Image (cartoon, helix red, strand yellow):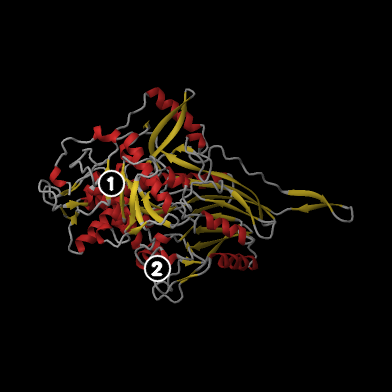
Amino acid sequence: MNKTMYKGLLATAIIVALTGCNSSDDDATVNIDTFNLRIAHINDTHSSFDPTSLDFTAQVNSEDMSINTDVGGYPRVATALNNARTMAADENKPFLALHGGDAFQGSLYFNVLKGAGNATLLREMNLDAMTIGNHEFDLGDGPLIEFVNKVNFPLLAANLDTSADSQMSGVTNIKPYIIKEYGDVKVGIFGLVLEDMKSISSPGEDLVFNGEVVTAQATVDALNEMGVDKVVMVSHIGLDRDIRIAESVNGVDVIVGGHSHTLLGDFTNIGRGMGSSIASYAEMITNPNGTSKTCIVQAGEVAQAVGQADITFEDGDVTVCQGNNTLLIGDNFTHEYVEDTSESLTEADQSAVEAFVAEQDNIAITEEDALLRSIIDIDYKPLIEQFEGKVIGQVFDANDPVDTGMLDHVRQPGVKRNGASLPVTGSEAGAHVAASMVWKLNQHGYDVDMAITNTGGVRNDIKNDENGDLTAGYIIGSLLYFSNELAIVELKGSDVTQLLEDTINYSLTTSSGSFPTFANVEFTFNGKAVAGEQIEDLHICPNGVAAGSCTDIDPDMTYKISTNAYIAGGKDGYDIFETKKLSPVIKSGFIDNESMIEYVEALTLAGQKLEEIPTGLTFIAPTSFEANLDNPVFKPEDNQ
């Protein structure tokens, strides 16, 4: 059997009886009702049919080696779930496979197929149940209803009231809970969705989303009245709210979560740190009654990992909960990706890395399920290739008489990499990429104030092809080919100021791609000023710099900032995103290149071309950096 996530899991002890003394001092045998359950789980898979990329550290010959490989994808998840199910059957152990919501969005497959591709592939995974994520409602009720009617497992949402909705009231496969029977033992599984769903998605107006805590307790009580004392909640409300449920509700034995994209567990053995600072994998939280406990698990994002938990119940209460998440990787190892190249491993190093992985509990080389891979490659990939040739709009730069069909991109102002050197304003292309982030998130009710992202994530100019058209394929393959997820970070205004100064200086001294590009912000960076005072006249422009209506940033106000998930984690000089964030990072499930495509399409629908917009930057180079600037300026007529 292919080794996946099962390495190193301890078998749960089965306790059949305990012996004690009664009050009359007569010896008596106290029978303990013991039940063991195994749960395999996924969440926030976001249409990640194909693998994504993973960097990790392997110990090779007593030294750390930085490794890149592919990770996850639906075919690997299918393999892991099938293996988990087989192993549970071999051990005669009751088994559940659960999905914590948000199968929709996240890749071009969803852009093209909507929910149909997910329905087909998830059917093959033999899930027992799934809850409804906020992204399942992004396109309204219709695509969700089609998905629900096609899958072979129920969608659970105890706090969703569909009774007043003419479309969804008749959908029979959305249920508050189900009851699974294992011999004479009953396990109740109920779903919980965001009570504030309408603020971040597009559900029907007549749908009602009831309170999370109240509904959870009422559902547990109802299940208990039916003789069900083993209760699993599959939720899409985020780790912090899962913890709130555990601390506020009696009787939820296990929470299989989603929404916060949290890869719970300790991954320091592969150089990736702890998945969360507030909970470990299978964290046990004491309920308000002070006696019973709730075990919480969650398995990260974008189909990279599958979690597995072994749970022991005694007289209806959880006494043991243990397990881990496992990253599902390929064996196509290279040295960690740097700039535009990566280097293959020697045969000896390849073998050493494989041996290292085989010894770990939380990362495993996993084969792809052949059926799912063939469905994707034969039925879906040709549609994606066709989509990539789709014309989405045209570029026109009136300020550039040389290249009117191109918006130029530079990593650092005044240093040519592609197109013009733009010594004062910085990247024309980056300004639109940042604007598309704000546009996309605010289309879905996130109310972000600005976008700040790194120019290194923008890989090229934005330009028409030889026919004078901008295509979806160019956005995906040349402009934003990393497919970064949009994330939201909250900072105080004073920390926004410090972030901008820090990242610009980091770019000028350490990493060119960390230079920020932004939307709804304007300021002067004066590199000749003293440290701490280099950001001058920082304004927030709610409707974009071109619209005016800008106001001074308030150092004490909280601002919502759109960025990409990579730098939201404090990478590439963006430490403040990690150290000064006022709340957990929100990962939206939207991908930057998809968002850019939709943004351009919206402009085209409105009869507009993609034209140059103000970047918001006035850049004054530090004296120490002046030698790096282009002299003479390349294409000076495009520096308006």
Label 1: which secondary element = loop
- Residue 1 visible to the viewer: no
Q: Nearer the viewer, residue 164 or 609?
A: 609
Image mark for residue 203: 2
Q: CA distance from mark 1 to mark 2?
A: 30 Å
Q: Nearer the viewer, residue 415 or 599?
A: 415
- Residue 546 visible to the viewer: yes
Image mark for residue 511: none
The image shows residue 122 at horizontal and vertical percentages of: 41, 54
The amino acid marked with disc number 2 is Pro
Residue appearing at x 16%, y 39% in the figure = 633
First in sequence: mark 1 or mark 2?
A: 2
Circle 2: is it few (<14), some (14-19), or many (20+) Cα within 10 Å?
many
The amino acid marked with disc number 1 is Leu
The image shows residue 275 at horizontal and vertical percentages of: 50, 44
Q: Nearer the viewer, residue 539 or 477?
A: 539
Left or right, 534 with respect to 213, comes to left
Label 2: which secondary element = loop
Q: Mark 1 or mark 2: which is in front? A: 1
Q: Is residue 320 above or below residue 625?
A: below
The image shows residue 405 at horizontal and vertical percentages of: 14, 50
Circle 1: is it few (<14), some (14-19), or many (20+) Cα within 10 Å?
many
Q: Quadrant of residue 349?
A: top left
Tell whether label 2 touches label 1 (CB within 8 Å). no
Q: Is residue 67 above or below residue 478?
A: above
The image shows residue 528 at horizontal and vertical percentages of: 31, 40
Q: Quadrant of residue 150?
A: bottom left
According to the picture, the residue beneath numbered tag 1 turns out to be: 480
